[in-house]
Image (spheres, rainbow, N blue to C red):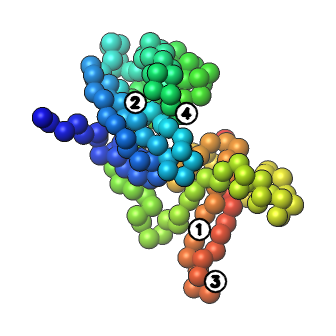
């Protein structure tokens, strides 16, 4: 029996976000990967769509609705939809549903965090963010900003409103921590 494999780019995405792959299911040009976050225990459904009924081979609104149903069936907390491109109606449906969508082209062929000049980035949980803001007696918007389109923020799945912790090595302090507020 042939072992099911997911594209290397998707494997890299799971690794960068710290998700553990649990099961894979392939059917009619759609690959579903069920993964979990060991830290939070949340379940993720990553769906890779390689075939579409549209001439442009874009992800259709029907496929987005199918993703919504799959999230309910598999009891996943979050969904990531990956496709070659997305039809306009599909993008509108995605905005309403809260599913993260990624174009296959924009997935990196390498892990940017393996480069020596790119420090570790991580999204703070709600509790950690509240504690940080309380400690510094600040509002989130008073922190230095980082755009949601930043390659490191996109790689870890940051969205506007999140607070990112950046850990850099320092010759004097060992490690230095920086915090950024994600903006659009």
Q: Earlier in the sequence, mark 2 or mark 3?
A: 2
Question: Does residue 100 appear in this view?
Answer: no
Q: Quadrant of residue 171?
A: bottom right
Question: Does residue 66 appear in this view?
Answer: yes
Q: Position of residue 166 (x, y in %)?
A: 61, 63
User: In the image, is 78 to the left or to the right of 24?
Assistant: right
Label 2, on which residue? 47
Within 10 Å of disc 3 (Cα), the crowding (few <14, some 14-19, many 20+) is few
Label 3, on which residue? 173
Q: Is residue 67 above or below residue 45?
A: above
Within 10 Å of disc 2 (Cα), the crowding (few <14, some 14-19, many 20+) is many
Q: Earlier in the sequence, mark 1 or mark 2?
A: 2
Instruction: Give the camera-side residue of 4 and 182.
Output: 4
Query: CA separation, marks 1 and 3?
Result: 12 Å
- Callout in the foreground (4, 1): 4
Query: CA separation, marks 2 and 3?
Result: 42 Å
> Given the current orientation, which residue lies at the most extreme right position?
137
Residue shown at the point (41%, 52%) measured from the top left: 15
Q: Is residue 40 above or below residue 1?
A: below
Q: Secondary structure at mark 1?
A: strand
Q: Earlier in the sequence, mark 4 or mark 1?
A: 4
Query: CA separation, marks 4 and 2?
Result: 14 Å
Q: Position of residue 24 (x, y in %)?
A: 31, 34
Q: Position of residue 183 (x, y in %)?
A: 69, 45
Q: Secondary structure at mark 3?
A: loop
Residue shown at the point (63%, 83%) measured from the top left: 173
Q: Which mark is residue 90?
A: none
Q: Position of residue 84 (x, y in %)?
A: 37, 29
Label 4, on which residue? 77
Label 1, on which residue? 167
Q: Secondary structure at mark 2?
A: strand
Query: CA separation, marks 4 and 1?
Result: 28 Å
């Amino acid at each position: 029996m042939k072992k099911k494999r997911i594209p290397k780019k998707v494997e890299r995405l799971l690794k960068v976000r710290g998700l553990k792959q649990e099961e894979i299911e392939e059917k009619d040009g759609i690959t579903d990967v069920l993964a979990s976050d060991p830290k939070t225990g949340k379940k993720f459904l990553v769906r890779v769509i390689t075939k579409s009924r549209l001439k442009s081979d874009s992800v259709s609104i029907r496929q987005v609705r199918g993703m919504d149903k799959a999230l309910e069936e598999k009891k996943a907390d979050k969904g990531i939809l990956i496709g070659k491109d997305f039809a306009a109606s599909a993008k509108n449906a995605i905005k309403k549903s809260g599913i993260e969508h990624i174009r296959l082209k924009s997935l990196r062929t390498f892990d940017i965090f393996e480069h020596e000049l790119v420090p570790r980035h991580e999204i703070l949980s709600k509790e950690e963010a509240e504690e940080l803001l309380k400690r510094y007696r600040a509002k989130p918007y008073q922190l230095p900003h980082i755009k949601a389109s930043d390659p490191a923020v996109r790689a870890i799945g940051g969205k506007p409103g999140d607070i990112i912790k950046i850990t850099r090595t320092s010759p004097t302090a060992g490690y230095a921590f920086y915090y950024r507020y994600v903006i659009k």
